[in-house]
Image (tube, coloured by chain):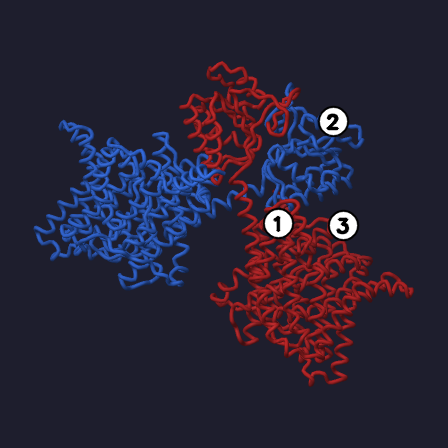
Chain colours: A red, B blue
Amino acid sequence: MSQVSNKVARGAALRRFVPILDWGARYDNAAFTSDMVAAVIVTIMLIPQSLAYALLAGLPPEMGLYASILPLVAYAIFGTSRALAVGPVAVVSLMTAAAVGNLGLTSPAEYAAAAITLAFLSGLILLVMGVFRLGFLANFLSHPVIAGFITASGLLIATSQLKHILGIEAHGHSLFDLVGSLLSHITQTNLITLAIGAGSVAFLFWVRKGLKPLLLSWGLGPRMADILAKAGPVGAVAVTTLITWGFDLQSKGVAIVGDVPQGLPPLTFPSFDADLWTSLFGSALLISIIGFVESISVAQTLAAKKRQRIVPDQELVGLGASNIAAAMSGGYPVTGGFARSVVNFDAGAETPAAGAFTAIGIAAAALFLTPLLFFLPKATLAATIIVAVLSLVDFHILRATWAYHRADFTAVLATILLTLGFGVEIGVSAGVVLSIVLYLYKTSRPHIAEVGLIPGTQHFRNINRHAVLTHPELVTLRLDENLYFANARFIEDYLLARVAKGGIKHVVLMCSAVNEIDLSALETLEELNRRLGEAGITLSLSEVKGPVMDRLKRTDFIQNLTGCVYLTQFAAMQALGPVDGSVPVCAEQGDAA
Amino acid sequence: MSQVSNKVARGAALRRFVPILDWGARYDNAAFTSDMVAAVIVTIMLIPQSLAYALLAGLPPEMGLYASILPLVAYAIFGTSRALAVGPVAVVSLMTAAAVGNLGLTSPAEYAAAAITLAFLSGLILLVMGVFRLGFLANFLSHPVIAGFITASGLLIATSQLKHILGIEAHGHSLFDLVGSLLSHITQTNLITLAIGAGSVAFLFWVRKGLKPLLLSWGLGPRMADILAKAGPVGAVAVTTLITWGFDLQSKGVAIVGDVPQGLPPLTFPSFDADLWTSLFGSALLISIIGFVESISVAQTLAAKKRQRIVPDQELVGLGASNIAAAMSGGYPVTGGFARSVVNFDAGAETPAAGAFTAIGIAAAALFLTPLLFFLPKATLAATIIVAVLSLVDFHILRATWAYHRADFTAVLATILLTLGFGVEIGVSAGVVLSIVLYLYKTSRPHIAEVGLIPGTQHFRNINRHAVLTHPELVTLRLDENLYFANARFIEDYLLARVAKGGIKHVVLMCSAVNEIDLSALETLEELNRRLGEAGITLSLSEVKGPVMDRLKRTDFIQNLTGCVYLTQFAAMQALGPVDGSVPVCAEQGDAA
């Protein structure tokens, strides 16, 4: 290779891992303006959200802001989605609370250090997955399991925030723990806090549904109406902060955010304590996968609308870099959020630069606005969380899966119940494991159809569903599954039971649906061939696929077969149909695949 | 139902769960004689084996005898195999040592109590699996994984016995630990012990290979020669015991069995300590499954030779009852052994009564022979174990899987290496998990063939393997796998990349190998249909199977399909082949399956 093409190749590889080099070179004024507008809107939305999600994760509010600065810059450099807005999100914040809560730490400083380490570990895992192109692992989370998990998490999160609305204490990682804890403290409810919290919830729901039409009817432009509606949480924050300050509600027991350090994020380092890494690894893996799945779903939905392309393995690198940036700057685990990405997209973000501009906005907030947050009631932040997550709760998936497939339904229901009953980590792990177990169970008891010829065609179908031609001494069974260790014995039992009915001279296994025969299944077929042979019955195969045939040819199975391997089932019936008791003469087996 | 038929049904159900009622009613003199002869031979073989395997499990020798009495009676009542000989076996003894060794117990009494509890738990698990007909779970152990596990266990067991041959101390559950421990003590080798041990090993190997031909050449009948050859271990036991007693070798550092209590098995009860149950549960589950797999393989091999039938779920009940009997009578986990069952079968055992007669023989030994075992050197018992288990070691499976299937090979190699490196429990668990993961990985990246018509037939095959007819504007892809969550995205990416090449008006997905479409995959197909539609390309399906079509009809997918569902691929090509750009008119979709 010449030096020049070497350079080109290196350039292409670099652009693959650092997409900013690609879009950055073509950045212009128009894109800058669009990105700036989007950044302003997302910043307004993100300030209260960042504070609130830090609260949900059990962390000091400034960590939410910090997690919305450098991670956004890192994603702008390494990510491939044009519209994805990265930062703290509800589900990952809840998972952070669960993971760090399990460690039994008492000091807030240790708790924060564990969250930082969790972000670092999660970043490492994502980077490794990206570099080794392991993005496909996320495919093992089925859509229904994700839907069920998000719904259950939304309910858990909303319930966990009720304590702030009521102004009481409550703890727990499961719905029952939370509700029990809430009920045992409910007599201590602070009525002023409740008024602020419930008022904010009502206000925010109204902003979602009623504000935009109202503004439009007042003659505002749709763009402006949209921005004002998105600023609803900021309005709630401002008004309740002012009320709390004006009426000195803090002295009446209203919990407030209090001192938030003023300034840019500090430089932080994760702990390298081996025990901490061991205890957090499982949680970090779950957070990485859930975060990746949430992020990639949003990114792909938005990219498809503009016919752009997402590179999943590069997205892993982008999210990995974001999480490491979070760990280095006092943040906690982040990912691409659904709501804010949609807002970013709708507001016209053209490139990942919009994320970088948002980061500047949040940094400005951290520098100048934090003193104003002193009197912000925690109940207001809880209200913004509740309103945000209740939009995620959607039990429709239960109805959809019930109608379509009981196995899918079982996996969803288990995911929802286990998440509610035992928390996020057990819930989502169980969902994944159950999906796989149900799939394997199904393939271990495959559908086997006895088939016959549809008159006037060369096509064979199930004798129980179609009017077909058959021959009394010839049984053709279509095996509707790969033959592998989990179903080898089932197929053997089925076949021997079918043959035991008597009067059969030839058995043909139609392998059009068999994409693989592993060694366990091959041994079973050899045994079947031997036992049928002893009973004077020939065993043939038809429609064996190329890759399967390639493998069988490496063994002596085909030489020992009492029957033949036929290219088509039609050829098998033509050869075996007029049964005369003679052993069939096979054509060159090599043609058979 | 009338009272009489009620009674008949109850009788049949009873006979299903208590097979002795079935064969016991037809028991006669001839069967009695055959069973007695077999019992005598198996008893002679089982006495040294029982003592040796108890030693391997780290238990006092009498527990090996006790585990060979009541469990055999229980199996005779509840088991279905005519020839299976139940009792302590090598692999399960090693697993017992690993399971109980993990508890860190110091007193021998606690150790024995834990082994008894392990047998009880294992019995419960087997019974529950039998009653709920969960025998299919054993199918998830693939043949290659079992073969690899047995080979590695054999090596581990042989190595673990070297300490008795050398007369030194050594501990460890992995090959490296054992070898390291042996090497660090090797200078303390007792030369007299070594002479006895190595002599016994050499003698027993010679008995296996050379004694029977020699006896035959001396003019003995083949039956008698066989029995004498099987009695080899008894000979070694007798001779080395006499030598040790005669020369007072005990005082020269030869380890002996010592006091073995004389009498019938005591009545024992498992511990009901919840912590102990929790720590032993995983091990008990593995022992149950491994024991069941070993037992059922032997039983089926032997039953097939006499065209008898084994009922796997009833075998679970039989083995469960045996293990509970072991726990109630001072034994430890048992299962059907390979070598002794073959001996039982070859010796002519006709019914499970042979097992009960063997139990009487062992009980007699426990009553009268134990004082004679005082001077029996442990090295002799170790020699019988080594010779027995080395016959299990067979690396052929590595070559067979390498030639046939790399995934199978990987699973076997990992099972062997992990068993040797980390012990039996991790080894076999990893083998099972890896088999499943490799299978899922393969199905997550399925084979997709572009197909065309084989001239002169109605059969479609891969365009890369066969000379076929195709049409430039029509692409037919045969999806060689079930469509489910793990591969939905892969298939989507593949299809969109194929279509991006341009010039295509119709895409047909040939579903002859698709046995299932889950909700995740259905959503992907809907998305594909939409995106292809936007690009002016129709999407059709062909050869959709009945059960899959039933499911699709519950959704609006087929109504929204831009193309049709064709009964056969041939029909699809006839309809779409002469492309005129018009949208195809579909026949009644209900006929399509």
Identify the amino acid type marked 2: Ala
| Quarter that holds the N terminus of chain A | top right
Whether residue B476 sits left or right of residue A546 in the image: it is right
Q: What residue type is labelled 3?
A: Lys
Q: Residue at x 32, y 35 (%)?
A: B25
Q: Which of A423 and A1 is in front in this view?
A: A423
Q: Is residue A317 above or below residue B198?
A: below
Per the rendering, the mark at residue B136 is none
Q: What element carries label 2?
A: helix
Q: Quadrant of residue A329?
A: bottom right
**Which residue is farthest front?**
B3
Identify the disc placed on residue A305.
3
The answer to whether marks 1 and 3 sit on the same chain is yes
Q: How crowded is mark 1: few (under 14 residues within 10 Å), some or many (20 or more)?
A: many
Residue B75's spot in the image, x, y percent? 32, 44
Question: In this rendering, would A582 be left or right of A341?
Answer: left
Q: Which amino acid lies under the numbered mark 1 shown in the image of this protein? A: Phe
* Residue A86 seen: yes
Asked whether residue A545 is in view, the answer is: no
CB within 8 Å, label 3 to label 2: no
Task: Give how far across and how far down residue A10 sits, in percent.
Answer: 63, 49
B347 relative position to B457: left or right: left
Chain bearing tag 2 is: B
- The image quadrant that residue A126 belongs to is bottom right
Q: Mark 3 lies on which chain?
A: A
In the image, is residue A445 above or below residue B252? above
Q: Give the mark nearest the N terminus, 1 or 3.
A: 3
Q: Alpha carbon of mark 1 to alpha carbon of mark 2: how far?
A: 37 Å
Q: Position of residue B314 (x, y in %)?
A: 40, 42
Q: Mark 2 points at which residue?
A: B575
Looking at the rendered structure, the secondary structure element under dot 1 is helix
- Depth check, mark 3 against mark 2: the one in front is 2
